[in-house]
Amino acid sequence: MKSRTTVKSFLLALGTAATLLSGAAFATDTPASLTGATLVDATKAKSLMDGGAAMIDARVANEYAEAHIKGAKNIPYKEKSAKAADFDATQDSFDVAKLPTDKNAGVIFQCNGAECWKSYKAAATAIKAGHKKVYWFRGGFPEWKAKGYPVE
């Protein structure tokens, strides 16, 4: 009887550990940084915009239409690739031709916060396309609104 209880306890503990590990392996938050991009918060993003940097909203058109950062340009990142740092951009769609033609101009990418991969992927795609001053606003629209900055 004792061995049955021990086996059940072991299996329960093993199942719990497997569940926790699988949850960690499939965490949906974006990485804390992006090579080639400067991570910015709402205050820095606003300052960059005030200085002429383009704010790109990578969310889908209906989200942008509902509400967006005042002055942001919507260039939706249409993703089918995995929500992972090593995503396959060939599975996705993003029109880099709509970004500023001056690849030395500042460009800020944002979407719906740390769990939204669209701005991460759009920024990575812009870097690969040769843009030099790429800023990733990881906190995105939720952080902007929480600061009370202008939306439309």
Image (tube, rainbow, N blue to C red):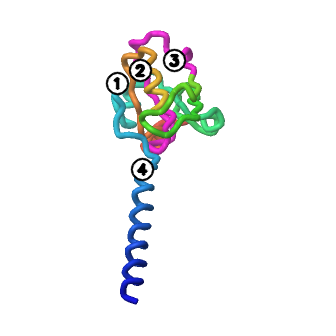
Question: In the image, what residue type sits under mark 1?
Answer: Gly
Task: Say what secondary structure mark 1 lies in.
Answer: loop
Report whether 90 appears left or right of 86. Answer: right
Q: Residues within 10 Å of mark 2 (few under 14, many from 20)?
A: some
Q: Earlier in the sequence, mark 2 or mark 1?
A: 1
Q: CA distance from mark 2 to mark 4?
A: 27 Å
Q: Position of residue 139 (x, y in %)?
A: 42, 40
Label 4 element class: helix
Q: Amino acid at mark 2?
A: Ile
Alpha carbon separation for disc pair 2 and 3:
11 Å
Label 3 amino acid?
Leu
Q: Earlier in the sequence, mark 4 or mark 1?
A: 4
Magenta highlight on residue 118: yes
**If you read the primary sequence from the N terminus, does the residue marked by circle 3 or circle 4 appear first?**
4
| Residue ID for mark 4 | 25
Q: Is residue 152 visible?
A: no
Looking at the rendered structure, the kind of residue marked 4 is: Ala
Q: CA distance from mark 4 to mark 1?
A: 25 Å
Region in magenta: 95-119
Please name the residue that numbered disc 1 is placed on.
36
The residue that appears at 37% across and 84% down in the rendered structure is 3
Q: Residue placed farthest to the top in the image? A: 102
Q: Which residue is labeled 3 in the image?
A: 99
Q: Is residue 50 above or below residue 40?
A: above
Q: Which residue is mark 2?
A: 127
